[in-house]
Image (cartoon, rainbow, N blue to C red):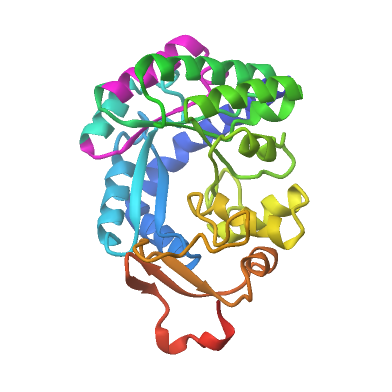
């Protein structure tokens, strides 16, 4: 019943958007640029964003997002998911997604092939066909609960293997993993790891919590993300990835220095400052010069206290703050 409840909620929001989206289009670029500024202030310089592609406003939001990324091209690296928010099949958006890829979107998106598109096989096949046609990666939102969710993941895994798309598919949310047996979760995790299918989680509160420690142990690359930043779906998104690392650590009881430090790699693309033997793993000579200076004595303190960010550097360029404002004796 969880998936049925969730789908009703999503359909209600879809109807809201039919009224809201056209009214917001005129300010879409301004809002996208404000969003990028917020993310920069919070230390994020490598951004993947999901952009609505739908019959209501067509490619209007994509055009605005591309323009915003052009404005900030020296400060951030950005990739856009052509995201058929109202369902790839449900809203007849297949051609729109293809047009979005031609316009400059980088990844093919999709959402809940079962409860939104109401046809798991056709939805997944269509997503993968578009990805192959445009030689693009995939990022699909899967909110469906329990075995319905994991069944969809297993079908996606099979199609990923058939297409030779290993390492090019991400599942956002993957909530179904939080409502199945440990054995089922382990089997799915092993399948995803073998095909290098990533998972992105917002570490949601009040929903099924996916077993991130298990996924990590099985070799699935897990990253954290922000959802619903100042939009009508939820008022709680902040754009602060350090806050997400903090929530991850608190949710799974990672309270000692080593485990708190481990939480950092879920927001840095897998990079850790120390390896399992306590030796420096980052930074090293030759590494890309993209980093954040924060007022903390160690990574564990930064995660636990969500310490203030003083300086953000992207590809060797200072994009937030200035060296004159940094007291290096207080920073590591």
Task: Return the x and y of residue 246 as percentages of the image width and height.
Answer: 67, 58
Query: Residue at horizontal 31%, vertical 38%?
Result: 106
207 left or right of 45 in image: right
Q: Can residue 238 be seen from the camera position used here?
A: no
Q: Quadrant of residue 257?
A: bottom right
Task: Return the x and y of residue 274 as percentages of the image width and height.
Answer: 57, 61
Q: Which is nearer the eye, 71 or 291?
A: 291
Task: Return the x and y of residue 92 as percentages of the image width and height.
Answer: 37, 19
In magenta, the rendered stretch is 103-132
Q: Which part of the image, by quadrant, shows the C terminus?
A: bottom right
Q: Quadrant of residue 208?
A: top right
Number of numbered discs on residues:
0
Residue that sits furthest to the left in the current view = 102
Q: Which part of the image, by quadrant, shows the N terminus?
A: top right
Query: Residue at horizontal 47%, vertical 25%?
Result: 195
Query: Residue at horizontal 67%, vertical 43%?
Result: 204
């Amino acid at each position: 019943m969880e998936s049925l409840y969730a789908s009703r909620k999503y359909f209600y929001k879809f109807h809201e958007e039919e009224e809201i989206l056209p009214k917001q289009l005129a300010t879409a670029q301004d809002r996208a640029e404000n969003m990028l500024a917020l993310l920069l202030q919070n230390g994020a310089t490598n951004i993947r964003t999901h952009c609505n592609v739908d019959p209501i406003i067509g490619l209007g939001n994509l055009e605005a997002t591309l323009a915003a990324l052009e404005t900030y091209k020296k400060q951030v690296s950005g990739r856009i998911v052509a995201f058929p928010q109202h369902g790839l099949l449900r809203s007849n958006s297949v051609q729109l997604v293809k047009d979005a890829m031609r316009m400059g979107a980088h990844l093919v998106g999709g959402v809940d092939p079962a409860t939104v598109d109401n046809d798991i096989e056709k939805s997944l096949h269509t997503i993968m066909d578009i990805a192959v046609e445009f030689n693009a990666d995939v990022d699909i939102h899967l909110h469906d609960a329990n075995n319905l969710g994991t069944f969809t993941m297993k079908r996606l895994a099979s199609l990923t293997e058939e297409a030779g798309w290993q390492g090019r598919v991400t599942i956002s949310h993957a909530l179904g993993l939080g409502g199945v047996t440990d054995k089922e979760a382990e089997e799915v995790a092993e399948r995803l790891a073998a095909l290098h299918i990533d998972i992105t989680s917002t570490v949601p509160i009040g929903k099924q919590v996916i077993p991130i420690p298990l996924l990590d142990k099985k070799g699935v690359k897990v990253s954290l993300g922000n959802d619903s930043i100042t939009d009508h779906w939820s008022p709680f998104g902040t754009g602060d990835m350090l806050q997400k690392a903090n929530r991850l650590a608190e949710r799974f009881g990672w309270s000692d220095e080593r485990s708190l430090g481990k939480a950092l790699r879920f927001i840095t693309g897998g990079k850790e400052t120390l390896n399992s033997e306590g030796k420096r793993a980052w930074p090293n000579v030759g590494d890309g010069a993209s980093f954040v200076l924060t007022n903390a004595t160690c990574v564990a303190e930064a995660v636990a206290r969500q310490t203030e960010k003083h300086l953000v550097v992207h590809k060797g360029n200072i994009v937030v703050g200035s060296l004159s404002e940094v007291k290096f004796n207080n920073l590591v």
